[in-house]
Image (tube, coloured by chain):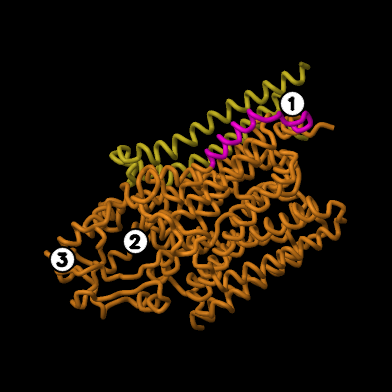
Chain colours: A yellow, B orange
């Protein structure tokens, strides 16, 4: 296996690791905090919002937005590190 | 100037703007027609994607849907935004790197199979056509209910405008009109929301207002709303109700993967210059979508609060606690004429009672204690929550005109995106890809324009003669996208060894099980009376709502594809190299 192939494999592995972390956060804020444990979370307040309700109708959306930009930024760093970035 | 003239002038001005853009942004090549020449700025594309995505349903119906569901309405909010995370991380950048024109084209090339491409085309056309019916109805609703113009006239006007910019400009014309439509739509949505938030809570930002105390009191709006809903026999607004937690989970998941698999949205990411622009552009798309989607829950909660407090101005069950029929505000009278709102004085006491008469215990108590004989708002269409908002809040006439223009912009922008997906599937995938591979570029462009024109006429016909199942199509479109396209596209990128046999079997099983499940409860091809099991939580298999079944169909697709792949031959070397190449942004020389 050539040097380049090894580097490609390392790039893909690093990428999958980043994907795993991002998708874990995606799942946590929506399915866990916004649905599965939302009822008990409602015992806490965020201003006038019960916390579980806030995650389901506000917080998860804000997190999704930040998540995509952080992913795009980390991928640009990875692309440069492994020298596969575009011109 | 009367309200109707003002509204028609505002809507007419937006139409003139769209036509102006069409003349400026004509398409001269297939690349411009299909992907706007790949020269769209990522932020501009984000805005166009937001308009492409946010349909008549998002603009007109979603806030009302949430208002009646409360907490579990979050399934729609999370589902229709979380899909962008999947699209940005798992599909859009790699498909942009692949660098072709359509979604079925990727499936055909990646799985070295015309059959796979044709299955993808069929699935694309079914979901896009069902979806476009809803948009045409949205145009009609905006015209007939707000502008008081006959539905057919409004529909023809809308079709004519789409015809001009979509047929002339293709993706290029559609992109720039979508940007204009986004601006109109978001302005129309947020202006009434800001006014209502100020009136109720004193906070001009609806997202903060929903978490604030009521004006002139130290009770939080949501706490007061919870209490009021419980007093009327409904479930507390911020608690689980309307659907089970399992169905909320499945519906959210099905909407997310369905969103990520919708071809008319995916192709928007083919229009940006580079792979990294596709990633960034998805983020911007969600920013622009998020502005509306985080405002909607405030609109929904505040609208239902306004409604309930108009009908029940004082303590429930007391004389001053109910609105007398003769004191009904003018907006109620006006919306009764549209048929979206209707009252019936069941116990003939001259005042209105609105409560949950489906809650047997509460209804029995109310009859005993107060002499109520059923809820007296007998029709309450959820669309009213957005459409009547400016009148309920007593806003000036230009805001009402703006809401009409916004609703029409939302419907037209989505319709145009869908029509492009349909016409490119016909001219590029079927005609050039399968039947006439040697067709010249000029003739393919002409074919694309003809396909677009036919699709507009067909969609208009369906808008005028809506099939009875129009209300069920959301389940179908998202179910099909979730169960057929998303898994196949994702495996094409993330599983190098996935082969033709696996992909085809997976798509067929995903499509088949989802259609079977939806038809079992909604009727075969939605013909009423042909449903085989009752469409109720008791009748559903393991309690799974057909609307959320797409998530399970997707799992069937993945599992079938994996098993079949293990039993059949690996894909050829050049296909595995293709997968390697879509995984890296740089194009090798």
Q: CA distance from mark 1 to mark 2?
A: 55 Å
Residue of label 3: B367
Residue B184 versus residue B123: which sits nearer the camera? Answer: B123
Q: CA distance from mark 3 to mark 2?
A: 24 Å
Screen quadrant of the N terminus of chain A: top right
| Mark 1–mark 3 CB contact (< 8 Å) | no
* Residue B202, placed above or below residue B548: below
* Residue A19, placed above or below residue B252: above
Q: CA distance from mark 1 to mark 3?
A: 75 Å
Q: Position of residue B88 (x, y in %)?
A: 60, 40
Q: Quadrant of residue A29?
A: top left
Whether residue B315 sits left or right of residue B481 in the image: it is left
Residue B475 versus residue B297: which sits nearer the camera? Answer: B475
Question: Which marked residue is nearer to the observer: mark 3 or mark 2?
Answer: 3
Mark 1 element type: loop
Mark 3 element type: helix
Magenta residues, start to end? B554-575
Residue of label 1: A83
Residue B304's label in the rendered image is 2
Determine the chain carrying the residue at label 1.
Answer: A
* Residue B501, placed above or below residue B180: above
């Amino acid at each position: 296996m050539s040097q380049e192939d090894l580097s490609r494999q390392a790039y893909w592995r690093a990428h999958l690791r980043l994907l795993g972390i991002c998708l874990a956060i995606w799942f946590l804020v929506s399915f866990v905090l916004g649905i599965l444990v939302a009822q008990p979370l409602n015992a806490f307040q965020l201003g006038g919002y019960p916390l579980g309700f806030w995650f389901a109708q506000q917080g998860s959306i804000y997190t999704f937005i930040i998540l995509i930009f952080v992913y795009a930024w980390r991928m640009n760093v990875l692309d440069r590190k492994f020298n596969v970035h575009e011109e | 100037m009367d309200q109707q003239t003002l509204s028609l002038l505002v809507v007419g001005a937006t139409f003139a703007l769209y036509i102006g853009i069409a003349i400026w942004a004509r398409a001269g090549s297939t690349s411009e027609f299909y992907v706007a020449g790949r020269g769209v700025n990522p932020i501009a594309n984000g805005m166009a994607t937001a308009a492409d995505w946010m349909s008549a349903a998002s603009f007109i119906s979603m806030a009302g849907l949430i208002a009646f569901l409360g907490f579990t309405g979050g399934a729609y909010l999370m589902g229709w935004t979380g899909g962008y995370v999947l699209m940005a991380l798992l599909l859009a950048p790699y498909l942009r790197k692949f660098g072709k024109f359509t979604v079925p084209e990727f499936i055909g090339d990646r799985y070295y199979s015309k059959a796979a491409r044709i299955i993808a085309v069929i699935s694309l056309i079914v979901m896009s056509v069902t979806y476009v019916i809803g948009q045409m109805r949205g145009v009609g609703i905006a015209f007939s209910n707000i502008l008081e113009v006959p539905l057919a006239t409004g529909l023809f006007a809308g079709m004519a405008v789409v015809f001009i910019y979509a047929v002339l400009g293709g993706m290029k014309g559609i992109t720039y009109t979508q940007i204009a439509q986004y601006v109109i739509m978001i302005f129309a949505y947020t202006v009434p929301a800001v006014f209502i938030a100020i009136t109720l809570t004193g906070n001009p930002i609806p997202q903060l207002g929903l978490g604030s105390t009521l004006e002139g009191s130290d009770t939080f709006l949501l706490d007061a709303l919870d209490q009021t809903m419980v007093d009327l026999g409904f479930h507390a607004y911020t608690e689980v109700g309307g659907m089970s937690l399992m169905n909320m989970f499945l519906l959210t998941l099905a909407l997310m993967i369905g969103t990520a698999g919708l071809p008319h949205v995916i192709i928007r990411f083919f229009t940006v210059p580079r792979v990294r622009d596709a990633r960034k552009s998805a983020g911007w798309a969600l920013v622009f979508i998020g502005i509306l989607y985080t405002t909607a829950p405030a609109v929904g909660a505040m609208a239902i609060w306004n409604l309930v407090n108009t009908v029940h101005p004082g303590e429930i069950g007391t004389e001053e606690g109910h609105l007398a029929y003769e004191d009904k505000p003018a907006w109620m009278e006006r919306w009764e004429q549209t048929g979206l709102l209707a009252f019936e004085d069941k116990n003939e006491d001259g005042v209105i009672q609105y409560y949950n008469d489906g809650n047997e215990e509460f209804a029995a108590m109310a009859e005993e204690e107060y002499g109520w004989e059923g809820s007296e708002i007998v029709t309450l269409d959820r669309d009213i929550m957005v459409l009547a908002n400016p009148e309920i809040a007593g806003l000036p006439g230009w805001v009402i005109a703006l809401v009409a223009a916004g609703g029409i912009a939302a419907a037209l922008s989505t319709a145009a995106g869908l029509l492009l997906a349909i016409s490119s599937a016909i001219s590029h995938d079927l005609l050039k890809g399968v039947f006439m591979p040697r067709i010249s570029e000029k003739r393919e462009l002409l074919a694309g324009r003809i396909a677009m024109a036919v699709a507009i006429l067909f969609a208009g016909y369906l808008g005028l003669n809506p099939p009875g199942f129009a209300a069920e199509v959301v389940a179908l479109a998202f179910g099909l996208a979730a169960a057929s396209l998303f898994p196949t596209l994702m495996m094409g990128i993330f599983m190098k060894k996935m082969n033709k046999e696996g992909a085809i079997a997976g798509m067929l099983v995903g499509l088949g099980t989802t259609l079977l499940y939806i038809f079992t409860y909604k009727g075969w091809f939605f013909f009423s009376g042909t449903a085989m099991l009752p469409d109720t939580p008791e009748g559903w298999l393991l309690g799974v709502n057909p609307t959320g079944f797409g998530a399970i169909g997707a799992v069937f697709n993945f599992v079938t594809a994996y098993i079949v792949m293990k039993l059949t031959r690996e894909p050829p070397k050049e296909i595995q190299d293709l997968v390697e190449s879509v995984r890296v942004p740089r194009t090798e020389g």
